[in-house]
Image (spheres, grey):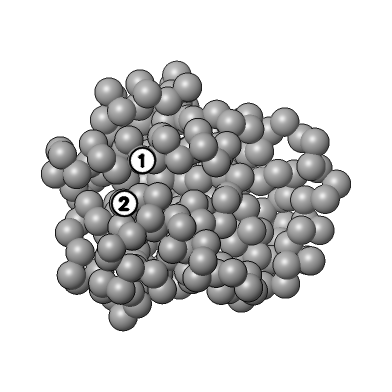
């Protein structure tokens, strides 16, 4: 993933009142995410490499949208830009009416922490933190006083109630991804981004993670945007967006 090693983090310390104010005026907007004219170009030697071009996308509250396409089509780059983890070369992204790239990085991080959950292919757990501590992290950064109670409840929901004090290295891949699911859902996000969530898992573990992902997405009323190369998995979403050569083609 192009942003996996980036210094930008989806989580940081925040001022809750400021984050809430970001979307106060747009609370009735039916679109939780809107992108207009998104382009991404990077230098490749002496020439420019166009990764994305002229992407327009609207995602309505409660949708489950799969972004599909061949390797190199720009799927993960698009997801990173939609989440505010990478900046576009052109265009605009709004989450709940807030223009992401009109905000500074601290404000974007506050918005993400309040409204967005993330599930990555490589789990992105902190190795020195237990399962419980990883799941508590976004709550603690938001100043939530019941962080431990909420994290325990969510980890129990994903079947890890007996593994709270285990570190990632002592958990299987499927268990690590379930910790990541708990961490994503513990803040009850409006919008969940998932990038190849089963890409590092065997078939059985992956099926369990996907079952939980869709169940919890329904229970929490979250809007899901998922990058996947798996057409059968994409077919479980309410809509598919297909990329080819950096453009939406279907």
Residue at the location (27% across, 59% down)?
176
Instruction: Find residue 32 and report its image quarter.
Output: top right
Q: In this orientation, does residue 246 appear?
A: no
The residue closer to the viewer here, 73 or 65, is: 65
Q: Nearer the viewer, mark 2 or mark 1?
A: 2
Q: Is residue 52 left or right of residue 103?
A: left
Residue 233 vertical position relative to residue 197 in the rendered view, above or below: above
Q: Where's the C terminus, which quadrant?
A: top left
Residue position marked by numbered label 1 in the rendering: 212
Q: In this orientation, does residue 248 appear?
A: yes
The residue closer to the viewer here, 7 or 119, is: 119
Q: Position of residue 149 (x, y in %)?
A: 51, 66
Q: Is residue 177 left or right of residue 146?
A: left
Residue farthest along the right direction in this orientation: 25
Label 2 sits on a secondary structure element that is loop
Q: Which of the numbered marks, if any, corresponds to residue 36?
A: none
Q: CA distance from mark 2 to mark 1?
A: 10 Å
Residue 240 vertical position relative to residue 37 in the rendered view, above or below: above
Residue position marked by numbered label 2 in the rendering: 159
First of labels 2, 1 by sequence position: 2
Crowd band around label 1 with a 10 angstrom C-alpha radius: few (<14), some (14–19), many (20+): some
Q: Position of residue 68 (x, y in %)?
A: 36, 30
Q: Where's the N terminus, which quadrant?
A: bottom left
Residue 35 vertical position relative to residue 103 in the rendered view, above or below: above
Label 1 sits on a secondary structure element that is helix
Q: Position of residue 64 (x, y in %)?
A: 49, 30
Residue at the location (15% across, 39% down)?
204
Q: Position of residue 248 (x, y in %)?
A: 47, 27
Contact (Cβ within 8 Å) of mark 2 with mark 1: yes
Crowd band around label 2 with a 10 angstrom C-alpha radius: few (<14), some (14–19), many (20+): some
Residue at the location (56% across, 74% down)?
140
């Amino acid at each position: 993933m192009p942003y996996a090693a980036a210094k930008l983090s989806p989580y940081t310390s925040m001022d809750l009142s400021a984050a809430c104010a970001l979307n106060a005026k747009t609370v009735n907007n039916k679109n939780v995410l809107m992108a207009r004219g998104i382009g991404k170009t990077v230098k490749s030697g002496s020439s420019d490499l166009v990764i994305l071009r002229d992407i327009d996308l609207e995602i309505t509250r409660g949708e489950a949208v799969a972004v599909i396409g061949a390797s190199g089509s720009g799927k993960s780059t698009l997801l990173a830009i939609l989440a505010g983890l990478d900046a576009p070369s052109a265009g605009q992204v709004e989450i709940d009416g807030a223009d992401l790239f009109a905000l500074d990085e601290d404000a974007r991080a506050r918005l993400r922490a309040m409204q967005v959950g993330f599930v990555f292919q490589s789990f992105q757990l902190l190795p020195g933190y237990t399962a419980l501590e990883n799941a508590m992290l976004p709550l603690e950064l938001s100043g939530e006083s019941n962080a431990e109670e909420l994290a325990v409840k969510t980890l129990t929901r994903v079947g890890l109630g007996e593994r709270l004090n285990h570190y990632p290295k002592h958990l299987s891949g499927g268990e690590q991804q379930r910790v990541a699911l708990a961490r994503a859902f513990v803040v009850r996000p409006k919008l969940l981004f998932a990038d190849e969530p089963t890409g590092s898992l065997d078939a059985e573990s992956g099926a369990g993670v996907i079952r939980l992902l869709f169940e919890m997405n329904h229970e929490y009323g979250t809007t899901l945007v998922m990058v996947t190369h798996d057409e059968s998995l994409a077919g479980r979403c309410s809509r598919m967006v297909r990329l080819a050569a950096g453009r939406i083609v279907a």
